Image: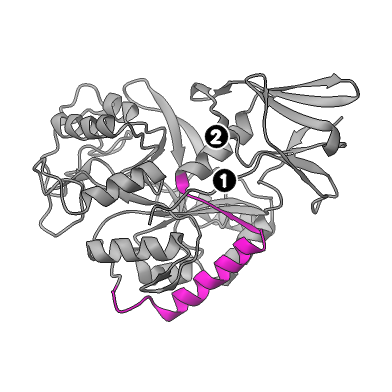
Amino acid sequence: MMSKLRRFPYPFKCALSISSDIDNASSMESFIAVMDYFNSQNETLFGAGLELEVGNSFWFYNNSESEQLSYFDGLSENRSPLAPLIEESWKSGHIDTLHSWGNFDAGGFTRSHAEAGLAVLRKHKVKIPIWINHGIGLNHQKVGDYRNMHGDDPDHPAYHMDLTREAGCEYFWIGKTTHIIGQDADHTLSVYTKRMIQWLMKHIRYRNVIDPIYNDGNQLCESMRFRDGTQGWEFTRFINAWGRENVLDVNDLETQLSPRIINRLIKNRGFMILYTHFNEHLKMTGLPQLLIKHLDYLKRKTIEKKVFMTTTSRLLKYKEMRENLIFQKKIMNDEMEIHVSKEIETSVGVKLVKREHLQGLTFYTDSPKKTKILFDQTPVKIAVNPKDETGKQSISIPWIKLNYPR
């Protein structure tokens, strides 16, 4: 009996997450309003909630000349007015990204800042899976072997990687972006052409640039060894399809999520993490009308089960499980049992598997009604699927959406 993993949860044809950095968020009120609009089914300031499962990021500190949203008030350890909402969103999974320990555009980061932030996470018993580098040169907390990135260098005063790993970070954005619509996608003409253009740009126009630009391939994530010897996944974010990086604010989001891009993502059958700052330049008077139109189109494609949409951490965990799952098939009384291991072996090391990590995994099988999945020797709830576009039948471990707390 066949048992091979489908690329996406049945019956989806691609996967998307919106990865938003907290920079220049217009206000606490706009932060709340847009998260309600993306995630809830309530009537919101911007219209009926979309229920799209969109995450967000946060800072612990702000040491810059501009007003910014952060957990602590400035460089103090006094909780800001936003702190209760951040805590609530940690626990629901809707804030899953540490956009570095803070905004240190004016410099001043020390290991003690990370220690204080980690103490808060320990207190609330939460883990933050995503790390995203922030900012200009004085943000020495950045990780990666490029200029002014010292957070993973044990010999530098800004070293914090051991604390960051304890905070839960396992997926890291160092700075690489892409214009290819869909990573780990089918080898379509669109993907091939964009990949060649990016390779030429990197090796000709940007040949003297030492900061991260593009991957030579089209992988969503690759293994990375940091300077302290630890390993993690480095992932790439999508900017746009044409090659120019704008502000990447709420106004740019309408073109990043155009129906043309969504339809190409479906055709390319890829994974995509979209890079934005959707709270930047967000006005309480309303969202751009074209953005609302495009978000409605995206919502329709999720309802049609063509676009699988979730938070960045859940998308990356799903992909990690799908690519590294260890399982054995056993035939018992003319039925097939799929026994799933409690560990995965990856290029960044061995990791433990939790039952919730299995959500969405879809196994092709010739006899779905005679196939069951066991984890830790106990049966896993499954759904039996009809044939998909390949003509194959399958079974899935149901995907459970996050419970939005508002």
- Inspect the magenta stretch and tell me whether residue 284 lies in it: yes
Can residue 152 be spotted in the picture? no
Q: Residues within 10 Å of mark 1 (few under 14, many from 20)?
A: few
Marks 1/2 in contact by CB < 8 Å: the verdict is: yes
Using the numbered discs, state the Cα–Cα distance from disc 1 to disc 2 in whole angstroms.
9 Å
- Image coords of residue 225 (percent x, y): 41, 26
Q: Amino acid at mark 2?
A: Glu
Direction from residue 340 to residue 239 in the image, left or right: left
**Which secondary structure, mark 2?**
helix
Question: What is the three-letter code of the residue carrying label 1?
Answer: Ile
For numbered disc 1, what is the local secondary structure? loop
Residue 243 horizontal/vertical position (percent):
46, 63
Numbered-mark total? 2
Q: Residue furthest right?
A: 334
Q: Return the x and y of residue 124 as percentages of the image width and height.
A: 28, 34
Which sits in the foreground, 327 or 208? 327
Quarter of the image where the C terminus is located: bottom left
Q: Residue 356 — which label?
A: 2
- The residue beneath circle 1 is 400
Query: Along the line of sight, which residue is nearer the eye, 320 or 330?
Result: 330
Q: Which residues are magenta?
A: 283-312
- Magenta highlight on residue 286: yes
